[in-house]
Image (tube, coloured by chain):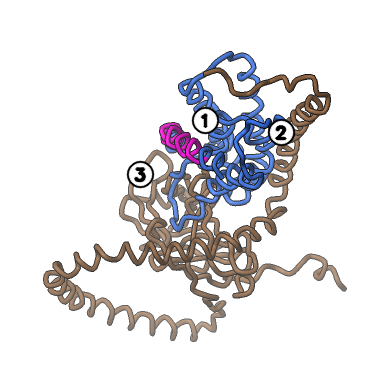
Amino acid sequence: MSRPPSAFAPQTSPTGQWLIPVGSVMAGSLVTAIPFIATFPVLPPFGLMILLGWRLMRPDALRVWAPIPFGFFDDLVSGQPLGSAVMLWSMAFLAIDMLDQRLVARDFWQDWVLATGAIAFALIGGRLIATGIEAHVDTLLLFQVIVAVLLYPFVARLIAWLDLKRGRA
Amino acid sequence: MASPRNRRPGYSRRAQYSLFIGYVIAIAGVLVGAILLLISKLDPPAFSALRAGTAEVTAPVSWGVGSVVRGIGAIPGWVGSYFGVHGENARLKEQVQRQEQVLLKARAIAYENIRLKKLLNMREPAIEDIINARLVSSSASSTRRYALVYAGIAQGVHAGMPVRGPDGLVGRVIEAGPDTARVLMIIDPESVIPVRRLKDGAPGFAAGRGDGLLEVRPIAMTTGQFAPGDILVTSGTGGIFPPNVPVAKVTERSRDSALAMPLARPDALDFATVMKTYLPPPPAPAQDTRP
């Protein structure tokens, strides 16, 4: 996990080290507070996308068990039944960890594929948990997944920028 | 790029253990999530206090951001209405004249209705509004359809109360916090509302589909299908929703049900009225058994 600081490591403040990843993921979950009354699921799961971004780009920024508290917070603000994100996000992150051990090297394209799998898994799983099978939400859910996947590169850019800030802080 | 993570933390026992314990906690998280999920499925209001506590913090923020957005969003409207004002004026004058007659007739009917009810000695529960409040945010990323209304127990809002907008029914309160309440909207896939057709009172049920539309089924097949153009209002059956609140307009007929568009367009909502539950809930059974 966290390596011992070397003498050559850039000087960083310990608060910014964890505050920026934690704050950014929570801010992503809080996007649901935007003053807008939705008719169908329109908003991509920004909390999950930012958490995935940190996990895939800076695996040392957050602990292995980070999906538990973040998922809990997301459930409180998202309207899903409490526990659904805790379970689904933890499962997705364990799966990513397992795939990570198989992959020797990966670049952004593989990151994107992993993120796509995790986003689709979390959204479809969340739909199955929260809504009955007879509800007419599947087409809309597919669009939500596509939009979220297409937005992931922007989230990745945002995290790269935040990571730069974090290093300099 | 090689994976930045060095999987093996080296020869330090402490680092190895901490990595191992991290994984143990992560796997335990899946189980904890499943248990929480089971609790919230079996007993939906179990975590309402936690959710209400979070909403206490987010609602003022949503409200503040909403005021700014509405202010900016109104500017194109001002400009547009400045140019369109003459044509609109003429059209509205004509409309007022046409509706004057209808209004007079409706007033006469309403008066007659009151008189007849008095003659019959009919007792009717009063339809009372609790408060007008702003809808501040919604569950936009979820397949469930909840809205957050910025009024709670402190303002007299309690779980079960119906909520209407200016155009029609919005839903009902399912969880009330100190200053906020969560509203289950009528378009939620788990919402079912007893309705009747405005023109002849044919009863039916309007269930949410999850995609912004309602699915309407008649109770009795003999009364016939709901046809496009039919207006549906609440029937008052069940005692939660007061009768005659507009709900939806039928748009399309399918085999044994019809599709309807809610009259309260949720994306255009800002204000909502929380109403008193139409009939008070029946007393607890413990009181009934007393001799």
Residue B181 is left or right of residue A2, and the answer is left
For label 2, the crowd category at 10 Å Cα-Cα, with few meaning under 14, some 14 to 19 and many 20 or more, is many
Instruction: Report the residue at 39% width, 46% height from top.
Output: B259
Image: B220 above or below B246: above
Q: What subunit carries mark 2? A: B
User: Does the magenta portion include A161?
Assistant: yes
Q: Quadrant of residue B265?
A: bottom left
Prevailing SS of the magenta stretch:
helix
Image: B255 above or below B86: above
Please tell me which residue lies in front, A147 or B229. A147
Instruction: Report the residue at 64% width, 68% height from top.
Output: B178
Q: What subunit carries mark 1? A: A
Residue pushed farthest front? A7
The residue beneath circle 1 is: A120
Please tell me which residue lies in front, B216 or B267. B267
Instruction: Report the residue at 72% width, 19% height from top.
Output: B8
**Which residue range is magenta in the image?**
A144-162
The residue beneath circle 2 is: B30
Q: Colour of chain B?
A: brown
